[in-house]
Amino acid sequence: MSELNELSEKLNGIKEEIRSELGKLESSKSVFEYRKKIFDSKTGMVGSLMREMGRIPNEMKAEYGKRVNEVKAWAQGVFEEMDEKFKAQEMRLKYESEKIDVTMPAKKPAMGYLHPNTLIREQIVDIFGSMGFDIYEGTEIETDHYNFTALNTPDDHPARDMQDTFYLSDKFLLRTQTSAGQIHVMEAKKPPIKIISPGKVFRSDDDATHSPMFSQMEGLVVDKGITLCDLKGMLDEFVKKIFGEGTSTRLRPSYFPFTEPSVEVDVSCFQCHGKGCKLCKGTGWIEVLGAGVVNKKVLEGCGIDSDIYSGFAFGIGIERIAMLKYGINNIKLLFESDMRVLEQIRE
Ligand code: DAH
């Protein structure tokens, strides 16, 4: 009998201890951990009680087991109750802390915008695309032949001085103009030809309006009976779409080795509409691109019969158009990724 009395005392002690420990617990996590500790089958105060069964005389084993199970059931019940209490409390706190005040002003997600260069390039591509032009993308590394010689600018031609060139070797260079693409296209395809060719070009040139790397868009049309009038008509359409309905173009004589005649194209000032302002330097006109009738020598060099076919070509500086359109006075602003500048330019 003494074993059973001893056990009763021990079980009461365990209950006491659990009760007083539970008072110290503060979260469902600590309840979980304490319960694990108590019920551990080797070291746990409750869990290890059954191991002592061996010591108990046979006739008392049933009673012993019963009492131990009672304490176990009691402990389980108490732990469950505590666990539920803490969980409810914790859930309430969680809801409380996650409560959303729907009347608070919302945080606006930062929006990305297209870069002004991209905007202009896409606009130009769209405009010429709608006129039926295809796109040809050349390579940034070119041979001296395609960039100069085939464009009627042989070695020692003074026009080579107009474009300070980055030479990679005697033969290879970084293209100074997208005009190089004209030759590739005319060699690969017979007329009718109607292409634009956007891309980066490179010149050893660096000031507020020039950068060693900038972008151009070449245009080339070759077919039977193409004249300067076709160029003028197309350019008038182009400037209306880029600079606004009220604008038009004028052509001034110029010189490019690969066109004859060559012209410099001005757009009527889209800011003052001809009255004269700072943007057009009081003239009412702004220079926007170079163009001309494709030189017969260039056509013949590409195997196109210049008695049957003629064409026009033009070269647009993308940054120049972006600077004019968005009132940017330094080309570097287009390459510096300064968000204060870029965020002002949206379309
Ligand atoms: N390639 C010339 C330049 O970079 C621009 C140009 C002028 C292109 C006249 C043309 C053209 O196709 O006909 O300055």
Image (tube, rainbow, N blue to C red):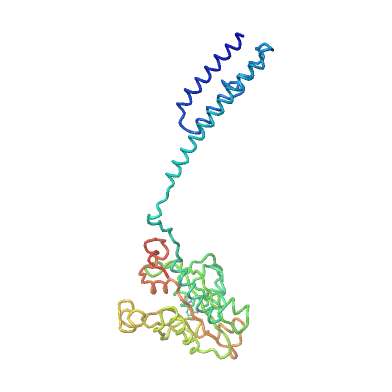
The residue drawn where x is 33% and y is 84% is 274
Q: Is residue 252 left or right of residue 147?
A: left
The residue drawn where x is 38% and y is 74% is 324
Residue lying furthest top in this view?
2
Q: Position of residue 122 (x, y in %)?
A: 49, 72
Q: Position of residue 250 (x, y in %)?
A: 41, 86
Q: Is residue 170 visible?
A: no
Q: Quadrant of residue 162?
A: bottom left
| Count of numbered circles on the image | 0
User: Where 76 sits versus 150, above or below?
Assistant: above
64 or 320: nearer the eye? 64
Q: Is residue 263 left or right of residue 40?
A: left
139 or 301: nearer the eye? 139
194 or 53: nearer the eye? 53
Q: Quadrant of the N terminus?
A: top right
User: Where 213 sits versus 51, above or below?
Assistant: below
Q: Quadrant of the C terminus?
A: bottom left
Q: Position of residue 78 (x, y in %)?
A: 53, 28
Q: Position of residue 181 (x, y in %)?
A: 55, 75
Q: Is residue 251 left or right of residue 138?
A: left
